[in-house]
Amino acid sequence: LTIASYHTATFTPLNITQGQHVSVVGTPPTQYANAFVSGAFIVSGGILELDSVSVQYQLNANGGGGLAVYSGSVSVRGSSFTNCKSASGGGAIFQAGGSLHLSDSSFYSCT
């Protein structure tokens, strides 16, 4: 599944599980903004690729306001995380397992 967008999008958290391959691409950066209790992206298997994505105003009570990685593979390139929060760690990103590759990305006001 490839999600390509050129505007702000709000959605319920995207949960990537075993066997799924999801690419989110935005040029100019696609913005994902909203406050969800479980964050924007949850990876518990499968593959997630974020390219030129702006993740904003996310909240996760369990860790990883913008992105939580429990297993699987995640690649983040040219993206930003802004005002992402977590009550238990990893304001922007929480990793408990799997692999995570970050490049050319930025973090602002994430706690």
Image: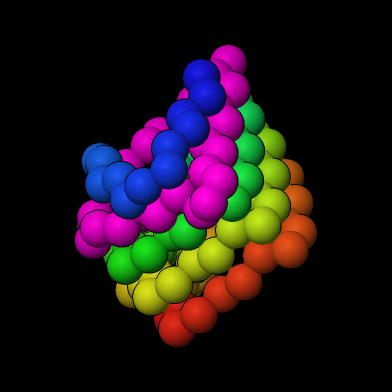
Residue 81: % across, % down: 50, 67
Q: Is residue 69 visible?
A: no
- What residue is drawn where x is 23% and y is 61%? 35
Residue 16 colored in magenta in the image: yes
Residue 36 colored in magenta in the image: yes
- What residue is drawn where x is 38% and y is 37%? 14
Quadrant of the image occupied by residue 60: bottom left
- In the visual, does 34 lie left or right of 75? left
Residue 47: % across, % down: 62, 30
Q: Quadrant of the C terminus?
A: bottom left
Q: Main secondary structure of the magenta part?
A: strand
Span shown in magenta: 13-40
Q: Is residue 24 visible?
A: yes
- In the visual, does 92 lie left or right of 101? left
* Viewer-side residue, 107 vs 59: 107
- In the visual, does 77 lie left or right of 17? right
Residue 85: % across, % down: 37, 72
